[in-house]
Image (spheres, coloured by chain):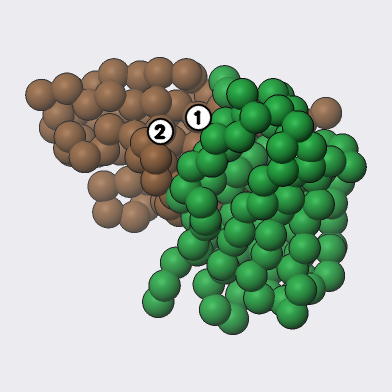
Amino acid sequence: GQNIDQPTEMTATEGAIVQINCTYQTSGFNGLFWYQQHAGEAPTFLSYNVLDGLEEKGRFSSFLSRSKGYSYLLLKELQMKDSASYLCAVNNAGNMLTFGGGTRLMVKP
Amino acid sequence: EAGVTQFPSHSVIEKGQTVTLRCDPISGHDNLYWYRRVMGKEIKFLLHFVKESKQDESGMPNNRFLAERTGGTYSTLKVQPAELEDSGVYFCASSQSPGANVLTFGAGSRLTVL
């Protein structure tokens, strides 16, 4: 079956660093995506990993270990606007994405 | 470029009624997807169009749901008759290519069935 786990909620302080973990068990693997979603808005693409290692894009980085079925999203220099839900999703070798439940991040001053 | 547009943003209907949701993908995107998120659950795949053809409809919950994409441009998702468990947010997404390509999502249509 398909299973993607990520924490439901996290809280962090403005200016700090936060790491959101995602573990997955899927029948196939063709890449892992992270999306950001503010309430009532469209999920927006943050990062894509298909090979092991770290992908860095400004304040956001994403890591993948395929052997461990594990990824994390690292957010540095947190800003208040980073308060949102972060969605981990796996493309499991079809044309569909399998999503985790999302992690709601609250950034406090 | 314009993003993925969905209409209506929110619909409230009674059980047994019919609702039609519309999605306008990014111009030139052949691949169009429908997903939905029911209360407290994760976003789940419903179906995938390539142009006007249904490539994969394995996620459609039952025959009360009908998706169309006549002409390969915009798509509609009709729920008839609606049931209470159909309440949730219906997302549309599009991409130029299938597979491990980035999907651009719309803001979703929130459906409330009373």
Q: Is residue A6 above or below residue B4?
A: above
Residue A75 location, quadrant:
top left
Q: What percent of the width, then of the height, locates residue A85? A: 40, 33
Query: Which type of secondary structure does the marked residue at label 1 adopt?
Result: loop
Instruction: Output the chain of dot 2.
Output: A
Colour chain B appears in: green
The circle on residue A79 is none
Looking at the image, residue A25 sits to the left or right of residue A13; the answer is right
Asked if one can make out residue B6 in the rendered structure from this viewpoint, the answer is: yes
Would you name the residue on which mark 1 appears? A102
The front one of B91 and A22 is B91
What amino acid type is highlighted by mark number 2?
A: Ser
Mark 1 or mark 2: which comes first in sequence? 2
Looking at the image, residue B109 sits to the left or right of residue B71; the answer is left
Q: What percent of the width, then of the height, locates residue B4? A: 50, 63
Colour chain A appears in: brown
Q: What percent of the width, then of the height, locates residue A95? A: 75, 56
Residue A5 location, quadrant:
top right
Asked if one can make out residue A95 in the rendered structure from this viewpoint, the answer is: no
Mark 1 and mark 2 residues within 8 Å of each other at the beta carbon: yes
Query: Which type of secondary structure does the marked residue at label 2 adopt?
Result: strand
Looking at the image, residue A20 sits to the left or right of residue A98; the answer is left
Q: Is residue A9 above or below residue B35?
A: above
What amino acid type is highlighted by mark number 1?
A: Gly
For mark 1, does the 10 Å Cα neighbourhood hold few (<14), some (14 to 19), or many (20 or more) residues?
A: many
Number of marks: 2
User: What residue lies at 35% left-to-right and 19% top-to-bottom?
Assistant: A10
Would you name the residue on which mark 2 appears? A85
User: What residue lies at 58% left-to-right and 48% top-to-bottom?
Assistant: B91
Q: Quadrant of the C terminus of chain A?
A: top left
